[in-house]
Structures are given as C-alpha cells and as structure tokens.
Amino acid sequence: MSYKIYHLSHTDLDGYGCQMITNHFFKNVEFLNSNYGKEIHERVNQIMQDIANSNIQNNLILITDLNLTLEDAKNLEAKVKTNQKDIELILLDHHKSGQDCANEFEWYFLDHTRSATKITYDFFSSIMNKDKNLSKLVDVINAVDIWLDDSSEFELGKVCLGLISGAKEINRIMFNKENTNYMFSILQNIQPYFSKQNPHIALDEATHNIKKVFFKKDKDDTLSNLVSACNVSMLTTNRDKMKINYGEFKGILTYNIGNVSIIGNDFLKTNPNFDFFMDITSRKTISLRANGKIDVSKMAAKIGNGGGHPNASGGLLNSFKGSFMYDDIRKQVTKILQNKGVHNHS
C-alpha cells in the first residue's frame, strides 16, 4: 500500500529534531516547517492542496513542536474529514498553550514534560526499533529544549541550539527541500562530537566546518563563497520559475536571501542573459544588482523611492505584503513592476 507522510514542524532545533526522527524511520516524507501564527495556516493549506493533487490515496499529516489554536484544530479536522483521500492526523507537542486542543481532539497529543523531539522519538521507536545514536541526539535536544540545566547534555544542547538557529545560509521559503537537507546534514554531523572529551567545547570549535561540509563540493573555499555557489546553482536551476520582467529587462527575484552583493553578482556572471537581480525582504526593502545592462539606481527610484549606484541600488516597496509562499511573493512583485512601468527609464 502506497502512502505519504506530510511532516510539518517548527523551525528550531526541536522542530528539525522531530523531522530527523521521521526521516530515520520512514520513507516518502514531505517535510515542511513553520513559525507560529499565520504561517501554520498557510502550510496546512499547502499540505491539503498537495494531497488533493496527488494520486496517493493514503496520507498521514504529522505536526510536531507546533500548537494549534482551537479554531485552527477544528478547521484542520473538518478539512481532513471532508477530503476524498484517506488522511490520518497526528499532532505531537509539548506546549501547555495547546491544552484545550489536547482535551478536545484524540489526535492531539500533549506532554509538557518532554521536548517534541523526545515525544516523537518515543512515539515511533515504541513501534519501530530503538536507535542508540538517535537516542543520544534526542537526549541532547531534550536537555536544552525543556531547559534541564543540571543535565550532563545541557551545555552540548546549547551549542546545537545555536548552530541550528544560526544556519540561515539556505532560504527555506524559496528552497524548502534543500534547507531541510542542510538541517539534516548538521544534525548528522554533530553526533560524532557527542563522545569527545568536553563535547560542547569540541563541537563549538567545529561549527564552522560542520556548515562547510554541506556546501563543499569539488574544492575548498571560504564559507561565504561556498554558500554563494550553492545558492547560484539553485537559482540557476529554478531561474525560469523565478524570472521577473521590468519592461524589456529580465531579472530574477529572491526573498530574504542575504549576501545580495555576493550572490547577486555571482548569479549575473553565471547567467549573462539576465539583466538584474532583485531581492525583497519581509520588511519590504529591495536590493538590486545589475551587470551594466540596466541602471538599477533609476529602477529603484521609480519602483521603490530608492536609489544608489547603476549596478547596486535599493529601495522600499510599500505596497508589498509579506507571504510565506514564494509564488505569491513573485506574483505580487510582478504586478508592482507592471504597474510602475518603465516610461522615461532610460
């Protein structure tokens, strides 16, 4: 019997730890992540749409390290019950704010004495087989997530917490699968340090190289250059889906990508048929880079009351509304660029 698991989890160490557990025990899993608030609603809708478009009849929606509001839980259960596909629903969490939901729904499991990673591991390892290495990782995450500061794993957990929270090199809105693989790589590569003397110090000193392991391919380089090369490769692969136009000029749109000067210029060198690079942030600011074919200082002034240099400028798109879905972001920016026009640009 074919099946698929949709695993939605939080965006911190505990959230990715839960997904590491699922990835260990199961195949055919789609991993999604969310912060609290509106994004949970959008991710649930995304899952339901993916299930509707899939030819797989049997599905499991697994939510971990996220607590739903009572209204969201009711809406989710209603969507599952009225769907044509067979959908099982499980939520594993440890936040006390979800107690009302836990009291009302049998699929909503809550235990505030354990981290969500430990709940998930205990839940599935009781059905499958326990794993010694995975169990150690679970204990480390559990110690820091529920703040067991007298635990021998606490200091080690603090280093792991900082490593995951600082792993912003791949944007999960644009490149969800690649970001998940990056987090799994980190969680896999930190484990050999658990058995070293003073493991928290050893791991702290190795964090830079643990990041580089994921990005390093044929040759070594600075982390910044390796990250840029990775991002340029992903952008180049997806350039047709991320393309935007400003009159006769062709550009690519990114969202909160960071390191715009490096990544933007590297992308334009690799893709000379593109005229400009635009990054927009959740704060509505835009950064523009060009390769001499368009004066982006004039473009920034026209669309975002900004300015700068011919090949490097910025501004602000006041009418832009933040979103957690890249396609929605691109549609918004495309419409803004169309409305602003390019009259008297050159």
Image (cartoon, helix red, strand yellow):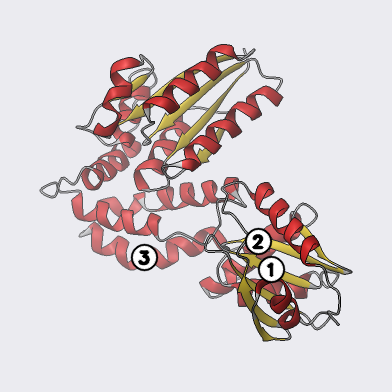
- Res 343 label: none
In the rendered image, which residue does mark 1 sit on? 278
- Seen from the viewer's position, the closer of residues 345 and 175 is 345
Instruction: Give the label on residue 206, or none.
Output: 3
* Few, some or many residues within 10 Å of mark 3 (<14, 14–19, 20+): few
First reached walking from the N terminus: tag 3 or tag 1 = 3
**Figure quadrant of residue 95:** top left
Residue 263, placed above or below residue 31: below
Measured along the vertical axis of the image, is residue 86 above or below residue 14?
Answer: above
> Along the horizontal axis of the image, is 196 left or right of 221?
left
- The mark found on residue 254 in the picture is 2
**Could you give the CA–CA distance between mark 1 and mark 2, rounded to whole angstroms?**
6 Å
Amino acid type indicated by mark 2? Thr
Q: Which quadrant of the rendered structure holds the C terminus? A: bottom right
Looking at the rendered image, the disc whose residue lies closer to the viewer, 3 or 2, is 2
Count of numbered circles on the image: 3
**Percent from the top left, x then y, of residue 333?**
70, 58
Three-letter amino acid code of the residue under disc 1: Met
Residue 217 vertical placement versus 33 (above, below): below
Category of crowding for the residue at label 1, using alpha-carbon neighbours closer than 10 angstroms: few (below 14), some (14–19), many (at least 20)? many
View extreme (left): residue: 150
Disc 2, SS? strand
Residue 338 left/right relative to 52? right
Task: Tell me which residue sits at (73%, 60%) in the image.
Answer: 336
Q: Is residue 94 visible?
A: no
Circles 1 and 2 in contact, beta carbons < 8 Å? yes
Q: Nearer the viewer, residue 187 or 331?
A: 331
